[in-house]
């Protein structure tokens, strides 16, 4: 059995199917850990969840866009964190992915997927001592005792500051490895590859925009990627409420 970690999917069903095929992923035998943000971006969020539900051994670390999707499912609106601007238009790709051919929302599917999201974890530590979290943590506190729980979903400092400091000092985070998403690597790696700093891997390679989706073997660090997001958007309908 392999353990693989996958970066931010953002509704990109074509990319998800591509990386599964290219990694020769076995949904019955391989383990998959998602770093979150399955939702929003490309117009197939619901389809991505259906694909992930086929995986027998699956762990979801909650992402901020997944939280917004769950808020919509349960409350009919988005509840962004302070300083984060969201409005009705930001729900377009999420809502439209649940439309039936007759135009009505598939309420049964919405409720089933709400259950999928409610099983998500804020972070995950595997038996090998690897930490998986969507965004990061405040490293002044233990991972389980964060004073502000939103840090799991919104942090940028783990990648932009702490990982850089460890890399320059030749030190490491207090885990075997750390895997994160949330902050796209495209500015650092325009070629669309994941970034390693010290013992941290950022595998959000921009599948929600024009980048690629990445799936990686956590033992060997071998990874497989989809085509560029800009290419995969060809033929996708423009969405609007």
Image (spheres, rainbow, N blue to C red):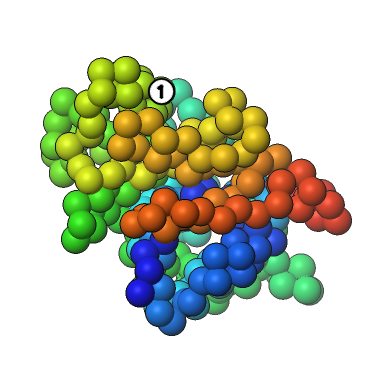
* Residue at the spot of label 1: 160
Is residue 81 among what the camera can see?
yes
For residue 3, what is the image quadrant? bottom left
Say which residue appears at 59% left-offset and 61% top-offset.
19
Give the answer, above or below, for where 225 lies relative to 115.
above
The residue at 65%/54% (across/down) is 226
**Residue 184 rendering spot, x and y as whole percentages:** 54, 34
Q: Nearer the viewer, residue 237 or 223?
A: 223
Q: From the viewer's side, name the closer residue of 100 and 184.
A: 184
Q: Is 96 located above or below residue 21 in the figure? A: above
**Residue occupying the far bottom of the picture:** 28
Left or right position of 87 against 143: right
Residue 119 figure quarter: bottom left
In the depicted structure, whether residue 46 falls above or below residue 241: below
Label 1: state its secondary structure: helix
Quarter occupied by the N terminus: bottom left
Q: Hey, which quadrant is residue 108 in on the image?
A: bottom right
**For the point 32% across and 24% down, which residue is it?**
167
Left or right: where 150 falls relative to 63? left
Q: Position of residue 131 (x, y in %)?
A: 26, 47
| Front-lying residue, 122 or 217 | 217
**190 lies left or right of 135:** right
Whether residue 151 is visible, yes or no, is no
Q: Is residue 6 left or right of residue 10?
A: left
Task: Rate crowding at label 1 as few (under 14), some (14 to 19) or many (20 or more) other CA atoms within 10 Å.
Answer: few
| Residue nearest the observer in this picture, 23 or 240 | 23
x%, y% of residue 34? 43, 57
Which residue is rendered at x = 38% and y = 31% of the image? 197
**Residue 180 location in percent, x, y?**
39, 42
């Amino acid at each position: 059995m392999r353990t693989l970690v996958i970066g931010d999917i953002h509704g990109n069903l074509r990319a998800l199917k591509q990386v599964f095929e290219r990694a020769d992923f076995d949904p019955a035998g391989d383990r998959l850990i998602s770093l979150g943000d399955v939702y929003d971006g490309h117009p197939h969020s619901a389809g991505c969840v259906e694909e992930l539900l086929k995986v027998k051994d699956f762990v979801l670390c909650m992402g901020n866009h997944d939280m917004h999707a769950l808020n919509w499912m349960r409350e009919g609106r988005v509840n962004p964190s302070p300083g984060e601007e969201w409005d009705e238009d930001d729900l377009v790709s999420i809502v439209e992915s649940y439309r039936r051919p007759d135009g009505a929302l598939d309420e049964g599917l919405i409720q089933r997927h709400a259950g999928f999201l409610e099983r998500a974890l804020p972070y995950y530590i595997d038996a090998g001592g690897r930490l998986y979290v969507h965004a990061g943590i405040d490293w002044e506190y233990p991972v389980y005792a964060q004073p502000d729980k939103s840090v799991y979903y919104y942090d940028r400092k783990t990648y932009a500051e702490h990982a850089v400091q460890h890399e320059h000092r030749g030190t490491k985070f207090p885990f075997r490895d750390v895997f994160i998403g949330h902050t796209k690597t495209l500015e650092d790696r325009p070629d669309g590859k994941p970034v390693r700093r010290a013992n941290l891997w950022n595998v959000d390679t921009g599948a929600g925009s024009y980048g690629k989706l990445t799936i990686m073997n956590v033992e060997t660090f071998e990874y497989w990627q989809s085509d560029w997001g800009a290419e995969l958007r060809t033929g996708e309908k423009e969405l609007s409420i």
